[in-house]
Image (tube, rainbow, N blue to C red):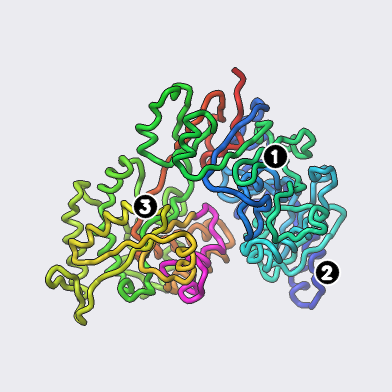
Amino acid sequence: MLSRFLNAIIISPFFLSCALHVAAEPSHGVALFGEPDLSKSFESLPYASHGAPQGGRIVYGERGRFDSLNPFTVKGRAPSTLRTHVFESLMARNWDEPFTLYGLLAESIDIAADNRSVTFELHPDAAFSDGTPVTPDDVIFSMEILRDEGRPNFGTYYSQVETAQKTGERAVTFVFKKQERELPLILGLMPIHARHDWEGRIFADTTLVAPIASGPYRVESIDPGASITLRRRTDYWGKDLPINRGVHNFDEVTVLYFRDDTALWEAFKAGIVDLRHETDPARWLDGYDFPKAEAIKRTELPHGRATGMKGLVFNTRNPLFTDRRVRDALIHALDFEWINTALNRGAYARIHSYFGNSQLGHTGTAEGMERDLLLPFAKFLPPDTLNTAWKPPKSDGDGRNRTNLRTAARMLREVGWRIIDGVLTNEDGERFAFEILLTPSDDEKVAATFATALRRLGIAASIRLIDDSQYQTRLQTYDFDMIFRQWWLSLSPGAEQSFYFGSAGVIKEGTQNYMGADNPAIDAMIAAILSADNEESYIAAIRALDRVLTAERYVIPLWYKPVERIAWWKPFDKPDRTPLYGYRPEVWWRTVE
């Protein structure tokens, strides 16, 4: 009755926010769909050890440099550890659930029944490192400063907020411009700043002034660009919250910065860096035989994250790659099995879909809701999309890939390409030639192996290596034929899918629709994800999106890591349980020996 009344009359934003706040139901946590797994009386996160020893020091290593202590603006580079250790948000994630938040700075969250507003009630003890309380004014200030002067992603989300108002001594209410299911959770994860910390300072500028923040650590010292050390606060307001029990166990956290991975590896071997997330499978197998390596522990930790998509990306804006059958032919030309064995010692698994390794990936025949979503767009889909789940072709791994190359040659003939004097040519006499654009961090060996295979089909694929700044410019304007790229896709996909794959990105510069995806079924499936009102329809829409993206053959898929390889010097330890999202260093601790 109240909702019909509100829809029937014109009311002020303030009245709207108050009315929606009354209609909402406070909760200790919130899930994108359904109820949070952990009850209001939970003692700690399921992957944290409640009684973990506290104290000691840990040293991490990272590549690169930093020149700012503000990680929320486009200027400068700031240590990532500031966001995870120094700043806090209204709510915090449980990394054992796809997208569920529990109270941190806010002790409760109220989402209106019609998803038009959200109210956060701040914890009465929430305070910044200088002892001043966290107030609704600080929350509103954080929204305004991040929206107006922060990174573009903050503006994207905060622009969906109609008003933000103090609606109680410790309450702040955000009213949305339209119904939003995901936005309340996103707002719950936004960093909260102390308003008084920025008086007389320009937020958008780089700064080496240590921030006043509410998190468990403060900045102890920095060597600009080279190292940063954080000290755990003995006066941290939230140390006894269930969300923090068994978390943030080190008294001191130091991050050292190195020029490249070789320097970082040598620092780890020397015991200067305590823990390493190993990304080189060959090194994992053969590289840990140096003196004193017996003092190192190693483990492989499983995870349930989606594979995302990593591979060689076709730019379909190039007429060469407009035809899906051409893209399919070139996928057959890449000998994944041989490359994975020769370069990676067979350590990786191949990506089959964008949301593989999770319940969100499509499999087999499209059925039920997934099929119903796709049927109206059947004419825009490759043949048999609804009845089969595509898998990349396999070779026998001998390096010759003869069967798949014959298949590729046949596919190319069927669309009008012929080999004349060793050169693949179309009916207009144009040669099949394109460029693979790389940066120094891309895998040139994979590109070179692929280019060699294409020569057997009469295709000339050249490789161009350029610096990062040039690459970013060409990336923004889609000025390339083929690139290496990776999309990290979450277990709770939402509005960002339009930025990744929406058809607006075919022309609009600066998106991550690098392939130029332009299929109405993709836009429709993204819309279905955003409008889903229950978990079943949400998962069906994601699987349908995954099915279309995979069937379109936009990317030659490469590999993902089904496990994370972690090496560390004694005496450090970890909980026995690994959460859904994998390795979480904040729940490790230093043992007493």
Crowd band around label 2 with a 10 angstrom C-alpha radius: few (<14), some (14–19), many (20+): few
Magenta-colored span = 489-516
Mark found first going from the N terminus, 1 or 3: 1
Q: Position of residue 529 (x, y in %)?
A: 53, 63
102 displayed left or right of 439:
right
Identify the element where label 3 is drawn.
loop
Crowd band around label 1 with a 10 angstrom C-alpha radius: few (<14), some (14–19), many (20+): few
The residue at which mark 1 appears reads as: 221
Identify the element where label 1 is drawn.
strand
Identify residue type, mark 2. Answer: Phe
Identify residue type, mark 3. Answer: Asp
The quadrant of the rendering that contains the N terminus is bottom right
Q: How far apart are marks 1 and 3 (CA)?
A: 36 Å
Q: In the image, what residue occupies the spot 53% across and 69% down? A: 527
The quadrant of the rendering that contains the C terminus is top right
The residue at which mark 3 appears reads as: 443
The residue at which mark 2 appears reads as: 15
Mark found first going from the N terminus, 1 or 2: 2
Q: Distance between the residues labelled 2 and 3?
A: 57 Å
Task: Work out whether residue 13 or residue 346 is closer to the camera in this orientation and state it.
Answer: 346
Q: Position of residue 198 (x, y in %)?
A: 79, 56
Q: In the image, what residue occupies the spot 35% across and 46% down? A: 349
Q: In the image, what residue occupies the spot 60% across and 43% down? A: 226
**From what the image shows, is residue 52 above or below residue 233?**
above
170 displayed left or right of 372:
right
**From what the image shows, is residue 553 above or below residue 297?**
below
Residue 511, magenta (yes or no): yes
